[in-house]
Image (tube, rainbow, N blue to C red):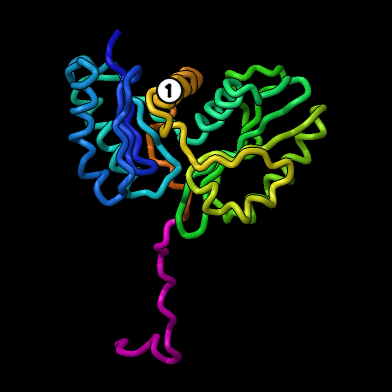
Amino acid sequence: MGCVLVIDTSYGSTVGVTGHEPIVETDSRTHVERLQVNIARAVKDAGYTPQDIDTVIVGTGPAPFTGLRAGIVAAKALAFATGAELIGHDVLAPQAQWNLIRRSKSGTLGDPKTSHVLTLAVNDARRKQLYFALYASPLDGDATMTRTLIDMDIDYPASIADRVNAAVREYATTVEGEIVIDVVGHGATKYADALRGIEHLGDMTDESVLDQGRQGLDIFAADATIAHAHDPQAPVEPLYLRRPDAEVPAPLKHVLGHEGAGRKD
């Protein structure tokens, strides 16, 4: 089997080959500069050469644009140079998958017929906002897949709590039993006060799936592969979500009587 390389720069940077421990850089001031070095090191430490790379899986966010773009550009260049297949995947959906696995291993997942674990996956968007999406297991209780209750978006934590509560009230009409909502991802504890307004709140975990070493890397890669099989034409582009700060300026106002100035008939 060939080499499957994972690159993500949605929060610091994570670089690794599936089945091996990744290299994680949390310092946002240096992670971009060290990206190429870490890619080469990860491939070499796993016992491969660049020519062995079959697949490059890259995190597409959502995340602040500059750091995110660096990882995607590196992944595209590497895939082009080696002929590897390029797969992009968001970083929120695997959070839900990891959360279900985490609860299952700790024995707190519960009976899917009477206990419904929802995951509010988040990532710090800065400017006092969070990227987020809300996921639930399918009604058949299959813990290997998730479905979306709130599509990926960016908002202020207090507003997110209100939106989650509204979505969960509607969801509650379709199921029976207890509902628990876990908040998982970077920024969870930073905005804990506002997020405690979420009804049925369960665990609050300020970690990413890609903080979980080899296991997390493999979960991310597996989720990306499944998503790619469902939509192989999905573009590999950064999920920034925030509207651009720059705006097209309004046209200049005409000064009264100025329109005809200098005109020669």
- Rendering quarter of residue 15: top left
Report x, y in % for residue 207: 48, 39
Farthest-out residue, top: 1
Main SS, magenta residues: loop
Quadrant into which the C terminus falls: bottom left
Q: Residue at x 28, y 16 (%)?
A: 3
Report x, y in % for residue 220: 44, 26
- Front in this rendered view, residue 86 or 265: 86
In the image, taking residue 4 as reference, residue 219 lies left or right, namely right
In the image, taking residue 7 as reference, residue 232 lies left or right, namely right
Q: Residue at x 51, y 43 (%)?
A: 206
Magenta region includes residue 242: no
Residue under circle 1?
Answer: 215
User: Could you tell me which secondary element the residue under label 1 belongs to?
Assistant: helix
Q: Given the image, on which type of amino acid does mark 1 rest?
A: Gln
Q: Is residue 233 visible?
A: no
Q: Residue at x 42, y 73 (%)?
A: 251
- Front in this rendered view, residue 5 or 46: 46
Q: Residue at x 34, y 40 (%)?
A: 9
Say few, some or many: other residues with alpha carbon within 10 Å of mark 1 (under 14 / 14 to 19 / 20 or more). some
In the image, taking residue 59 as reference, residue 23 lies left or right, namely left
Q: Above or below — where is 141 with respect to 162?
A: above
Quadrant into which the N terminus falls: top left
Farthest-out residue, bottom: 257
- Rendering quarter of residue 202: top right
Q: How many marks?
A: 1
Q: Is residue 208 visible?
A: yes
- Span highlighted in magenta in the image: 244-265
- Rendering quarter of residue 56: top left
Magenta region includes residue 246: yes
Report x, y in % for residue 8: 35, 35
